[in-house]
Image: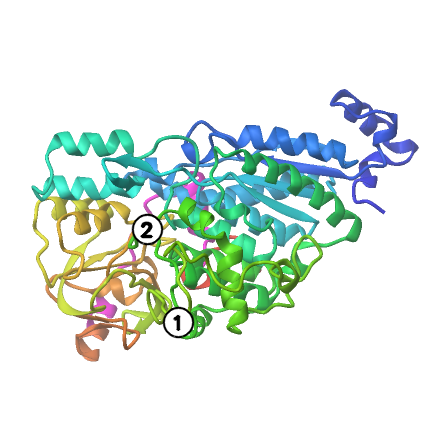
Amino acid sequence: MLRSAAITQGIQRSPNRAMLRAVGFGDGDFSKPIIGIANGYSTITPCNLGLNDLAQRAEKACLEAGTMPQMFGTITVSDGISMGTEGMKYSLVSREVIADSIETACNAQSMDGLLAIGGCDKNMPGAMLAMARMNIPSIFVYGGTIKPGRLGACDLTVVSAFEAVGQFSGGRIDEQELTAIEKNACPGAGSCGGMFTANTMSAAFEALGLSLPYSSTMAAEDPEKADSAARSAEVLAEAIKANICPRDLMTREAFENAISVIMAVGGSTNSVLHLLAVARTAGVELSIDDFEMIRQRVPVICDLKPSGRYVTVDLHKAGGIPQVMKLLLDAGLLHGDCKTIEGKTLREVLADVPAAPPANQDVIRPLSNPLYAKGHLAILKGNLAEEGAVAKISGVKNPVITGPARVFESEETCLAAILDKQIKPGDVVVVRNEGPVGGPGMREMLSPTAAIVGQGLLDSVALITDGRFSGGSFGLVIGHIAPEAAVGGTIGLVQEGDSITVDANQLLIQLNVGEAEIARRRAAWVKPEPRYRTGVLGKYARLVSSSSKGAVTDQPGL
């Protein structure tokens, strides 16, 4: 029996049917599956600008497949627009709001399936959390990536604009060039164009089997994206008949596949946070240490921005995520028996994908010639991060530094110091009280990291934080430090000038201060007053878990 029978069947549901008739149901429609279309359309950001067209195409396809679509809106916030401001504190919070809103609409209305359409960074993990909670047949339609901007012979992304700020402050470009980059970086609709967080999570979704093959790398403005949305509706209708549910697909092996793909493509640090959260919600045992285990065996084989040369549309032309997965599968680095939303195994989905990438490209390399021999997301531990920290070490010549701490209590004060040229080669920049509780909301440090790169300090300065990083960040950047400063983590005890060692080769992040002195500082530490006590940020700070557990708010027992 369909779940929607609770609102459509029986004499007592005559009032329910009366209201459904008002929104388009006819006599023959009450026995059809009801599909919720979670539409993330917004003019807030280019990432979500084209989603309404996809939603309407999916809606039509649902009707043709013999189901009844019901469309509802979900929010988004633009990380790129709010970056570096107080508003960025709402970014990670929006993941929970998206999940809560989808769960609320689908469960309140007894929907039989979910087709979620999203673009910006938190749309994917928000939908994933909702899917894992509800466990009704579900599919995700990614809004698609933006095409690269152009300036002369160079491809541009929004990160180019962030880095240009550092280049301008460092005297490396003039205001005219800065403005030219600004005007050309984002040419139209679609999510940020490199292997940043949105494209990373869409790739993870495809690897988990909850999106259609090739859909995660399509350009937002290309016709194939709308065709894929329609096909997704058809597949979901069949999944409802077969009762294929998200937790059937979200197995331990599927999460390992997703992590392997993220390592291979050089994906965002945020993927660690999001996959931990989703796995916990799905009841799958997954820890931060599992990312390091997989990193050790999976090389980076895609040369993608932010640290590489190419953008996501180039990856799509080279064969997309299926080509990457095929290489990994043949090398024994993927679990081929994992099921997908189409009812096929991953091995069956990849059966017709070539064993080698096209010869006329170097976006995807063979495993015999990787960009990096090991994955780029290293899990560091030490007295500064007893629960762990996530280091993105792609693009760094030597991921080892010991230097004096330059301590900042917020992203804004840190950025001001960088732009004022107060940060010198050899410094270890510490940005604290930006964690899930302390921020609250765990802001991304794209502005400081991009400014460091823009000033030519990529290989000589480390930045560590209990906040997180944009998928556009690269360099010796270490985020998600847990425990965070606001709950008594050692990062809150660091003093200006203290020696800190970051050694990604040894997986170490260490405050080089004696245990007795650390104990003295800990005894004198005073918990900071919450920055917000009311509203969504106040509520979030009271409920959120450690970043090492995914920064989730639906913790049992609270």
Image quarter where the C terminus lies is bottom right
Residue extent of the magenta highlight: 520-545
Residue 477, position in %: x, y? 26, 59
Query: Is residue 350 found left or right of 42 in the rendered image?
Result: right
Residue neighbourhood size for the residue with mark 2, other residues' Cα within 10 Å, grouped as few (<14), some (14–19), many (≥20)? many
98 lies left or right of 303: right
The mark nearer the N terminus, 1 or 2, is: 2
In the picture, measured across the screen, residue 237 lies left or right of residue 305, that is right
The answer, for residue 404, to whether it is visible in the render is yes
Label 2 element class: loop
- Which residue in the structure is indicated by mark 2? 305
Q: Work out whether residue 391 or residue 51 is closer to the camera in this orientation and state it.
A: 51
Counting from the top left corner in percent of width and height, residue 127 is at 56, 46
Q: Quadrant of the rendered structure where residue 351 is?
A: bottom right
Q: Which residue is mark 1?
A: 368
Q: Residue at x 17, y 69 (%)?
A: 401
Three-letter amino acid code at the position of disc 2: Lys
Circle 1: is it few (<14), some (14-19), or many (20+) Cα within 10 Å? few
Q: Above or below — where is 20 with respect to 295? A: above
